Each structure stands twice: as C-alpha cells, then as structure tokens.
Amino acid sequence: MSVKHTQTIEAKTVQAGSGTRMQVLISAEEGPNFAMRRFIMQPGGGMPNHTNLVEHEQYVLRGHARIGIGDDVFDVHPGNVVFIPGQMPHWYTNIGDEPFEFLCLVPNKPDEIQILE
C-alpha cells in the first residue's frame, strides 16, 4: 500500500515524443496487476504512431488532443476514457492551447514499443 502526491514524483521526458513527459505514479513493483502513469503533453507536442504489446486504459484529465487508434481519429477532452488494444497502432497530438494530461494504466506484462513509419 502507498499514498503519495504527484508533486513528489519525477516527470521524465519521453524520448520518442515531442514536448511530452511522463510520471510513473504506481510502478509495476508497487501494483501487482497494473502500473499507472501520467502523461503531460505541451501544446503542439505528442507521440508518433507506434504500437505496444500491452493494452492501454486512459482517462483524460486536462486539455484537448487528437488521438489516432488504428484507422480511426478521435478528438478527446477532459472526462473522456480511451481504450487501446495491445499491438494497435496509435498516436497523439496536443491540439489545444494548454497541456494535455491523461492517466494511462497498463498491465504488468512484458511490453515492447515499436515506432511506425
């Protein structure tokens, strides 16, 4: 069991992204089944088209972004929930004037990120 505040957790730059940082709020060592991460994308920032082996469950906290999932494109706002199946190509672009922030839960299973052309 643990309780902490997001202000005490380091935000690391996401190397594959642009203007994107991530905090690991609950690590795989802390949670037996899922890890929880918080992503913060600056205006104009985002993540390129990529795949992961594991699924993603996401909840939008702040901002406005366009997300591609497979062949579909969605505009998302605070309160939206997003499910991305494992191995599904997906990308993000912050299209708002403020940071885009979301929580992302992933299962504690081996993962591999592949950037797509």
Image: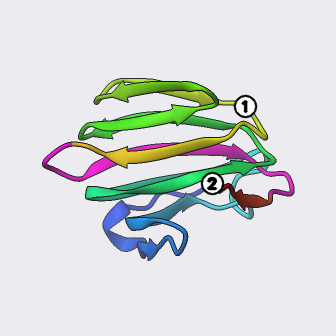
Q: Is residue 40 left or right of residue 72?
A: left
Which residue is painted at 46% across and 76% down in the image?
12
User: Could you say where residue 27 lies in the image, as x and y percent from the top left?
Assistant: 65, 61
The quadrant in which residue 76 appears is top left
The circle drawn on residue 63 is: none
Label 2, label 1: how far apart the Cα atoms are? 28 Å
- Callout 1 crowding tier (Cα within 10 Å): few <14, some 14–19, many ≥20: some
User: Could you say where residue 36 lies in the image, as x and y percent from the top left?
Assistant: 58, 50
Q: Give the residue at the far left of this rendering.
A: 97
The quadrant in which residue 21 appears is bottom left
Quadrant containing the C terminus is: bottom right
Q: Per the image, is 103 magenta? A: yes
Which residue is painted at 23% across and 41% down in the image?
63
The quadrant in which residue 78 appears is top left
Q: Which residue is mark 1?
A: 85
Q: Which residue is mark 2?
A: 1
Identity, as a three-letter code, of the amino acid under mark 2: Met
Q: Give the residue at the far right of this rendering.
A: 110
Tell me the magenta residue range: 96-111
Q: Is residue 55 left or right of residue 78?
A: right
Which coloring applies here? rainbow
Quadrant containing the N terminus is: bottom right
Identity, as a three-letter code, of the amino acid under mark 1: Pro
| Secondary structure at numbered mark 1 | loop
Q: Per the image, is 78 magenta? A: no
Which residue is painted at 81% across and 48% down in the image?
53
Q: Is residue 73 above or below residue 112?
A: above
| Secondary structure at numbered mark 2 | loop
User: Could you say where residue 57 lies in the image, as x and y percent from the top left?
Assistant: 60, 34
